[in-house]
């Protein structure tokens, strides 16, 4: 299954007008979108950080005046600006993929849930779990 983080709907959100929904990053500019609706607060924050980074990369303001002129959200403008980034955000296919580290993994490979703050994780002698 192909997944592109720019072109596909993958972000769960709460909407003021329809309840829960799944959107593309550019649709976050829709005034009816209230907030991401991941099952964990840390995932909501991570999603917001990714969206902020996408906006900055895809449509950075030229100057403060440009920033002030863009107070109203514009989903169509954002979709247009993010389109050029889409090839870099394809998660399946041949060759290196988005955020893929091509270096061999050093040390023990653990389960992905150890990335969460509240995970017990692994402990070494003389250390305490997070």
Image (spheres, helix red, strand yellow):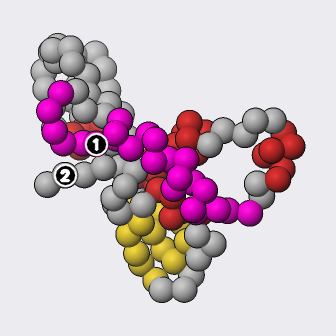
Quadrant where the image shows the C terminus: top left
Side of 22 relative to 49 (left or right)? left
Above or below — where is 57 with respect to 126?
below
Contact flag, marks 2 and 1 (Cβ < 8 Å): yes
Residue 113 in magenta?
no
* Image coords of residue 112 (percent x, y): 21, 40
Residue 123 visible in this rendered orientation of the protein:
yes
Side of 51 relative to 108 (left or right)? right
Above or below — where is 79 with respect to 91?
below
| Residue nearer the viewer, 87 or 64 | 87
Indicate which disc residue 2 carries: 2
Quadrant where the image shows the N terminus: bottom left
**Which residue lies at the image location 54% right of the left edge and 86% below the top edge?**
17
Side of 130 relative to 94 (left or right)? right
Tag count in the figure? Answer: 2
**Which residue lies at the image location 82% right of the left edge and 53% below the top edge?**
69
The Cα atoms of the two marked residues, 2 and 1, are separated by 8 Å
* Magenta-highlighted residues: 72-95
Q: Which residue is mark 1?
A: 90
């Amino acid at each position: 299954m192909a997944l592109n983080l720019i072109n596909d709907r993958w972000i769960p959100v709460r909407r003021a007008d329809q309840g829960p929904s799944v959107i593309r990053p550019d649709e976050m500019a829709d005034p009816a979108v209230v907030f991401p609706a991941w099952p964990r607060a840390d995932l909501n924050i991570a999603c917001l950080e990714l969206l902020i980074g996408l906006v900055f990369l895809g449509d950075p303001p030229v100057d403060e005046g440009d920033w002030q002129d863009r107070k109203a959200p514009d989903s169509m403008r954002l979709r247009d600006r993010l389109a050029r980034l889409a090839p870099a955000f394809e998660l399946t296919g041949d060759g290196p993929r988005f955020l893929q580290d091509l270096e061999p993994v050093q040390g023990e490979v653990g389960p992905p849930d150890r990335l969460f703050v509240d995970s017990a994780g692994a402990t070494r002698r003389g250390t305490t779990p997070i």
